[in-house]
Amino acid sequence: MQEAELQDAEELIRWSADRFQNRVALVTSFQHEGMVILDMAARLAPAIPVFTLDTGRLPETTYHMMETVRERYGIAVKIIFPDTEETARMTTAHGPNLFRTDADSRLLCCRIRKVRPLTKAMAGFDATLVGLRREQSETRAGLQQVDWHEAPAKIAPLAGWSAAEVARYTALHGVPEHPLYLKGYSSIGCNPCTRAVQAGEDERAGRWWWENDAAKECGLHFTADGRARRRVDVLLEEVLANRA
């Protein structure tokens, strides 16, 4: 299948299962998009394993979603945790709420709690299914359905979907919804780094809302600007070098 042909989300999930066999995984934080993909995969390719990141700072309702997935789909979600020693060194050096200091410190926190553990967990896979959409933000506007430049390859079945299409599928199939959506959230991450959005705000305005000059990304899917990336790399090296 050529990338230009990858238009239908369900077709893409079937293709992913056939193409990568047992070396494709779904990674989700149980937001609307991830749950739609999970619902499709449970019907079309139930052997695809489901992973999620537990950063240690998640809302309680996200844990409820893990149980909901188990009860509804019979899927035991595989939970990825950050390295305990790396997290301890980071919080000792920079404080438990370093993400409030500046964008570089926040990206360091994301790197330790999310990027590094996911990279390690996905080392044995050739592809990951993710719930990204082009409409979500300017950063994601150029998103491809299949990004072969990533390792593992990144597959976004809903890349071209609108929020309305996601909502229609969710309602039609009775897909479980994260409880925080009912409280005005439109994007859900770590508890201290996520809030409800206000009228007129864009979809990701509730993520790291105190930052005015940084992309609303954690580094899992898109990097920050070069300046921030270089500074974050220095901070990360300092944390990793400070071994007990």
Image: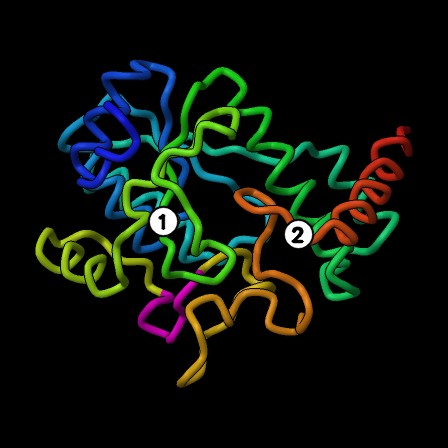
Q: Position of residue 26 (x, y in %)?
A: 36, 33
What residue type is disc 1 on?
Answer: Phe
Residue at 37% x, 74% y: name it. Answer: 183
Label 1 or label 2, whichever lies nearer to me, is 2
Q: Position of residue 132 (x, y in %)?
A: 39, 49
Where residue 74 is drawn, which disc sits there? none
Q: Mark 1 and 2 residues: CB-CB less than 8 Å, in contact?
A: no
Q: Identify the image's colour scheme: rainbow, by chain, secondary structure or one colour.
A: rainbow
Tell me the magenta residue range.
Answer: 180-187
Residue at 40% x, 57% y: name it. Answer: 61
**Cα–Cα span, label 1 and label 2:** 24 Å
Compared with residue 116, is residue 17 higher up or lower down, i.e. above or below?
Answer: above
Crowd tier of the residue under label 1, counting other residues whose Cα lies within 10 Å: few below 14, some 14–19, many 20 or above: many
Compared with residue 29, is residue 141 higher up or lower down, i.e. above or below?
Answer: below
Report the side of 21 relative to 172 (left or right).
right
Crowd tier of the residue under label 2, counting other residues whose Cα lies within 10 Å: few below 14, some 14–19, many 20 or above: some
Name the residue beneath numbered marker 2.
224
Q: Secondary structure at mark 1?
A: loop
Report the side of 87 relative to 28 (left or right).
right
Q: Nearer the viewer, residue 178 or 28?
A: 28
Name the residue beneath numbered marker 1.
30
Report the side of 242 relative to 49 (left or right).
right
Q: Nearer the viewer, residue 112 or 21?
A: 21
Q: Nearer the viewer, residue 2 or 23?
A: 2
What residue type is disc 2 on?
Answer: Ala
In the rendered image, residue 236 lying in the magenta stretch gets the answer: no
Q: Secondary structure at mark 2?
A: loop
Residue at 30% x, 31% y: name it. Answer: 3
